[in-house]
Image (cartoon, rainbow, N blue to C red):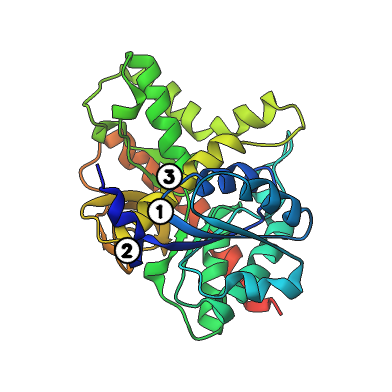
Amino acid sequence: MVSTLNWFTGANNAKVAVLGASGGIGQPLSLLLKNSPLVSRLSLYDIAHTPGVAADLSHIETRASVKGFLGPEQLPECLKGCDVVVIPAGVPRKPGMTRDDLFNTNASIVATLTSACAKHCPEAMICIISNPVNSTIPITSEVFKKHGVYNPKRIFGVTTLDIVRANTFVAELKGLDPARVSVPVIGGHAGKTIIPLISQCTPKVDFPQDQLEKLTGRIQEAGTEVVKAKAGAGSATLSMAYAGARFVFSLVDAMNGKEGVIECAFVKSEETESPYFSTPLLLGKNGIEKNLGIGKISPFEEKMVAEAMSELKASIKKGEEFAKNFK
């Protein structure tokens, strides 16, 4: 247990901004961040409703100060001095939509917001939730390159929800405590690019091949499961907020000097032929300390990696092309 004294020393005063704070993910995510002793300042930005969200959260008896910022003219002030910026802004999926269908709307939003980050908090850790992550991370990188402040160790595509789901579904099938199950999920963050490494699960689990294929398919399509269940009222917002907060807390812990913090994220990578790829990462004070790579995987998982490549590369290229033409 961390002694409470540590919470008040320098590094533990994380200044976090949420861009898209009034939305379906943004509100519960902001609530979870406000509830954390790791966060000292919470800056909430959106194009509507942020003063209300901020006022509401500011009444909660935790130490993080909360301020709402509204509209593009207030964005620079929101970002000043931030250590971590989380971006869930964008439109959610509706039934029948793929993550790729969100591309045009969300690509512009991400390019605009990350451009502001590059100008006003170039050193901050940037955590992108906005889909399609397989394209929005390359967009973010290209935007930071344009501004001459690109650092690949500080730009993360948050894929944590895939891990959270894998842990939950494996635990359900095996009657385990989900908090003690850990399944790395590699690749990307859409459909068949989501590759759960059940062979590397701790504790070790075994499934017959038909069950393994069904489980893998469920993890890959879990987002669609929620979109269908919500019947047009949105996509995974609460579980995504939980997963986003989990990733931010891990990152802040590592920035505070905690050793051995590992999370998977979609990042610039040389682990495969895909220029971006999610693998377990050792996090540190400056972001990615070490990419831990894929490790030993089963033939079934090897096949999934091979099959994901063309879709991954196409999504990455689409993001890069967009960013090059974005004014």
Q: Which mark is residue 9?
A: 2
User: Mark 1 sits on what residue?
Assistant: 38
Q: Earlier in the sequence, mark 1 or mark 3?
A: 1
Task: Locate the N terminus and report the quarter of the image it occupies.
Answer: top left
Which kind of residue does numbered mark 2 sit on?
Answer: Thr
Q: Is residue 139 visible?
A: yes
Nearest the viewer among 249 and 192 is: 249
Marks 2/1: CA distance?
10 Å
Q: Secondary structure at mark 2?
A: loop
What residue is shown at x 69% (from left), y 76% (from top)?
326
- Kindly indicate the quadrant of the structure image that contains residue 92: top right
Nearest the viewer among 12 and 60 is: 60
Q: Earlier in the sequence, mark 2 or mark 1?
A: 2
Task: Locate the C terminus and report the quarter of the image it occupies.
Answer: bottom right
Task: Give the vertical position of 186 relative to 136 (above or below).
Answer: above
What residue is shown at x 41% (from left), y 26% (from top)?
168
Q: Position of residue 314 (x, y in %)?
A: 55, 58
Q: Secondary structure at mark 1?
A: loop
Horizontal side, residue 179 vs residue 54: left or right: left
What residue is shown at x 36% (from left), y 21% (from top)?
171
Q: Is residue 191 visible?
A: no
Which kind of residue does numbered mark 3 sit on?
Answer: Arg
Residue positioned most to the top: 175
Q: Position of residue 52 (x, y in %)?
A: 75, 51
Mark 2 Cα shell of 10 Å, populated few (<14), some (14-19), many (≥20): few
User: Mark 3 sits on what residue?
Assistant: 246
